[in-house]
Amino acid sequence: MKSASIKPAGKSKKITNAKANPRFDSKSFLASLGTGHTSVKYRSKETVFRQGDAADAVYYIQKGKIQLTVMSAYGKKAIIAQLGPGEFFGEACLAGQTLYMGSATAAADSTIARIDKETMFRVLHDQPKLSEMFISFLLARNIRIKADLVDQLFNSSERRLARLLLLLANFGKEGKMEKIIPKVSLETLAARIGTTRAQIDFFMNKFRKLGFVDYDKEFLTSDDLTVHTSLLNVIVHD
């Protein structure tokens, strides 16, 4: 499907997102770790670690995407984050967490650096600049989590879906947007915003008819989901 060009409306309200997570210089950062890290390639849907595994390492995404999920005692699964290159996960082990409280799965073919907990402590202690960047990353992550919580508590399912689609399309990051890759299923979107698959299907059809998104007729088989800045109207207007 040929996508329309993406141009923000001239005088429309502008959302000022938190500053994008700081990106480490991957080569220099990984070189500083010495033998305390390993880089592993994962295929899409392959597990990095499972909920309940020993928390003994921090992970850094060199390439690809990682999906973090949690499973309740009753078997209900929730998606809590979807991360991309330049981001860390599993960092709670540095604060004394002994078991991973959720699972990490590759959402696309990925290359992940596994950094031993002791090695991470050493690098943060010996290299103040890297330590400062890591703290900035954690603060940015905390801001995003708070924004997600506020969104969950006060916004409708429709507005939460609109915000999620804009975030997945990198709205507000480096002045550009992109197609959502890898493809996102209705079930995944429902899990991310806490509603049903049927509601997501209804809202996605509504957004398409209004020209806010473009995708193939059969959404579940679509690899070509494009989000337009006009979707911002759902967020800035009641």
Image (spheres, helix red, strand yellow):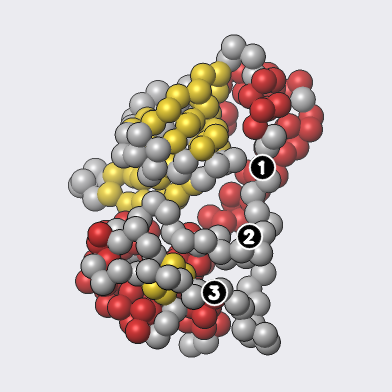
Picture layout, residue 205 above or below residue 119: below
Per the rendering, the mark at residue 23 is 1
Q: Earlier in the sequence, mark 2 or mark 1?
A: 1
Q: Earlier in the sequence, mark 3 or mark 1?
A: 3
Mark 3 in CB contact with mark 2 (< 8 angstroms): no
Position of the N terminus, as image quadrant, is: bottom left
Q: Label 3 to label 1, Cα distance in Å?
A: 28 Å
Q: Is residue 151 visible?
A: no
* Image point (61%, 78%), residue name: 8
* Image point (42%, 54%), residue name: 181
Percent x, y for residue 12?
63, 85
Alpha-carbon neighbours of circle 2 within 10 Å: few (<14), some, or many (≥20)? some
Write down the quadrant of residue 192 in the picture. Answer: bottom left
- Could you tell me the amino acid type at mark 3? Ser
- Could you tell me the amino acid type at mark 2? Lys
Percent x, y for residue 159?
44, 76
Q: Label 2 to label 1, Cα distance in Å?
A: 13 Å
Picture layout, residue 91 above or below residue 222: above
Percent x, y for residue 61?
53, 36
